[in-house]
Image: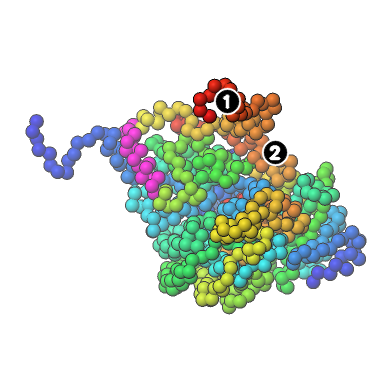
Amino acid sequence: MFDLAILQSRFGDQITESTFRDNHRIVVPAHSLYPILECLKTEQGFDALMELTAVDYLEYEGATDRYGVVYVLLNTVNSERLIVKTMINPPQLELPSVYPLWKSADWLEREVYDMFGIVFPGHPDLRRILMPEEFTAFPLRKDYPLKGIGERHNFPVITRAES
Amino acid sequence: MAVGLPENVFLTQLDAAANWARSNSLWPMPFATACCGIELMATAASRHDIARFGAEVMRFSPRQCDLLIVAGRVVMKMLPVLQRIWLQMPEPKWCISMGACACTGGVFDTYAVVQGCDRFIPVDLYVPGCPPRPEQLLAALIEMQNKIKQTGTLMGSEFGRRTTPTGPSPFDLDELRRAREMQPLVDLEIYTPPTLAEAVQAGAKRV
Amino acid sequence: MPLTQLDTAPPEAADQEFLWTLNFGPQHPATHTTLRLVLTLDGERVVNAVPDIGYLHSGFEKLGEHLDFNQYVTIVDRMNYLSPLANEIAWHNAVEKLLDIELTPRCKVLRTILAELMRMHDHLLNVGTTGLDLGAFTAFLYAFQQRELIYDIVEYASGQRFHTSYTRVGGVLFDVNLDWADKVRSFVKGFRPVYHEIDKLLTRNRIFIERTKGIGVLSQADAINMGATGPIARASGVVRDLRKDEPYLAYADYDFNVICSQGGDCYARYLVRMRELLESIKIIEQAVENIPAGPVNIEAASDVVLPAKPAVYRSIEGLIQHFEVLMPNRGYTVPHEEIYAATESPNGELGFYIVGDGTTRAYRARTRPPSYVHFAMFPQMIRGHLLSDVVAVLGSINIIAAELDR
């Protein structure tokens, strides 16, 4: 069962909580993210990580930090969901990997690294997963254009006569 | 020489005979990437039967096929694979680009999708649709058969003459021109038609 | 495409010299389109399998930031292309939750029927291609014939077989005809005999059982820890179904069972999908008997839904409302909030994390793709099995490349 008081007493008062429609959300500071998630998993019963993603708030109205990393946790026994969000800013784009807690974080963190450039120390194998290995930019950042900067057509042309 | 030929002997050109054989037994190489792949499978299923046209033998090895059907969007990471498969196919070979994504990039004008596989692969036939109905793919197959029957040769010499690429160039001038056209022009003189009085004064008979 | 020497060391490999590397894909006959596996084999036994994906990555999520909620449904369609309407229903479920819109009863029932038809669509193809990959071609043809009938039903409702873009915010594109329900009923009547034929072909088939029983076992603890959902999790003993645990649309009104199994192997997954076909037919039967009358889109006076065309052409209010909804800066009011909403798609939990920023475009439209999470479990499931089992396991976890790569 989710108990905010335990978290706040143990990890400080910076944890804010809110509810929107039927989503229960908490925002935690980045330095206490791993202990909080560990407490949520081991003591409060959130045994499945459903989703791990990031949002780039560069063009968002009223944003204070650049990146928000979102963890959607699920308690399979009583169907309770919790969304944990933490905010980070460049140049310290690093968050501890939660792979030791939930193995589903393996590929989810790789995708966040591939798309946003956020590094997860502690991850067993952090390399690009969706883009080719030699791709250099981070596509889902807001300063990368939709149509790319020419990588998609950078290949040799084969005509019929030579093939 | 008035030799009567029996009924089961006919005279033709070698080219026509080869074309007839090749077009009625096109073995497709399904390069099924995405949703068009499902419509390709549906074309091979029992309702729209591609076996009627001799093309149900979808051998997945490029060494044994003659018709490459690019069904689905081709992504930047997949393009070298597509090129390699095209080069691995033996002559004679043809290519059908199936679906909007393979023809022009479709809905996906993004950083990762190649805007048309014909920019990098020589394509013979384009099938529009998202996804094209199986009937449309069968019509394309019939069109392909007609094309082979009309323009094919025994030794495949028509392929050696196609030296220009079939699609737009990778970085095409259209994109640059469109980008230029979207910038507003300054100091542009805008034509204003003359008023009635001016036109009459200038001697117009009819206004 | 170079074979990169990946540094994930194979475990329990005493003498590494006889291990050889086989590249499986990205273009291969197992009809699961573009995914690549770099297999390290000891003779025929798989020592390690490293997946390499991204061969269909089309930038869906970046497109979501440039398209309207109603325009993005065309893109979401193309994710799990075996069950397009299920994706649309999931997307609009999330958007309607963000905008706090309650659907009309008729719309809920219609969407429920279509979602269940799409579940059957996906499971039929999966059962068919499982047979096809293992060499049983007839089951594939029977399954595809039933899928063609479902295509007919969907075409009758929306105008297109596939990629219908049928749902809209607050409703659907247009209402179904009066005899659409008859079409559904005739499909339902004809389905059960065909189900039994496919069953007779595969379920007690000695060869099929030998090739799938005990292969690719996923334990219950692993299933939960690695984020499995849907038929794969249920076949490993995780009793979770979003239609029962967090009901959405009209599922709370219908009586159906959740199919689970303890086996966790390919055979269990196949059986779960087959029995789920019967449960879906049960739901469709109940739903189609009493489709509520009434409007299918929410109140025409709202600022979210397009009014009916007769009202647009004949009344000034309809015309104004039409323009107000479509003009870019005058649509509906979207809160500056974020939401995560999931539905039970045929493949598992398909969730969307939408960040709204006041305009009618999502600021971030993230998809939680079930295939992506399931494919990460593949190396663990295949270790120690034979090369021919790779195809069986790949088929049973139902990887759809477009959802995998987005």
**Residue at x 71% of width, y 70% of height:** A79
**Residue at x 59% of width, y 45% of height:** B108
What residue type is disc 2 on? Thr
* Disc 1 target residue: B199
Q: Chain of mark 2?
A: A
**x%, y% of residue C3?**
59, 42
User: Magenta region's main secondary structure?
Assistant: helix
Name the quadrant containing residue B183. Answer: top right
Of residues B21 and C318, the one drawn nearer to the viewer in this rendering: C318
**Residue at x 43% of width, y 37% of height:** B124
Name the quadrant containing residue C137. Answer: bottom left
Colouring rule applied to residues: rainbow
Query: Which residues lie in the magenta part?
Result: B138-155
Q: Secondary structure at mark 1?
A: helix
* Label 1 Cα crowd, 10 Å radius (few <14 / some 14-19 / many 20+): some
Report whether C129 appears left or right of C21. Answer: left
**x%, y% of residue C222?**
67, 64
In the rendering, which numbered label is found on residue A136?
Answer: 2
